[in-house]
Image (cartoon, rainbow, N blue to C red):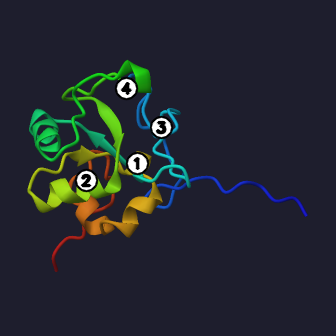
Amino acid sequence: MNSLPKLPKNVLGGPLRACCTEPITGFYRTGFCEIGPEDLGVHAVCIVATDDFLTFSKSAGNDLSTPHPEFNFPGIKAGDKWCLCASRWAEAYDNGMAPKLVLSATHEGMLDYVPIEVLRQYAVDDHTPKVQPQ
């Protein structure tokens, strides 16, 4: 029996798309928000950074703006896409500071933290048909 590796899926159930390669993102620095046993932070959500979110994240103890070349981390600026920890996005959401996100590049593991209905409110790529009121 030929067992193929399970391909990662996004929160919409489709194939996980790349989040960003400039700067290269993802826990594994593949450009994808892949998660695995080594990724204790669950870097599952592909965000589009904003200045407000970066300020919030720094004040919460996670400075994403300062480069750390020793960790292959260039520092993030507003407009950059980045694979963020699921719990950090949920914390930002709870505080009214959640950044926009890319559903097609957000790993399905994010659904363990935040329901799809909430994620869709922040999506820059949600093309789900809207239900019209009767």
Which of discs 4 and 2 lies nearer the camera? The answer is 4
Q: What number is the disc on residue 73?
A: 4
Q: Amino acid at mark 4?
A: Phe
Q: Nearer the viewer, residue 79 or 13?
A: 79
Image spot of residue 57 (x, y percent): 17, 43
Outermost top residue? 69
Side of 41 where 55 appears, left or right: left
Side of 75 where 94 appears, left or right: left
Q: What number is the disc on residue 89?
A: 2
| Residue of label 1 | 43
Which of discs 1 and 4 lies nearer the camera? The answer is 4
Rendering quarter of residue 107: bottom left
| Residue of label 3 | 18
Bin the neighbour count of mark 3 within 10 Å (Cα to Cα): few under 14, some 14-19, many 20 and up. some
| Residue positioned 36% across, 51% down in the render | 103
Q: Are marks 1 and 4 in contact (CB under 8 Å)?
A: no
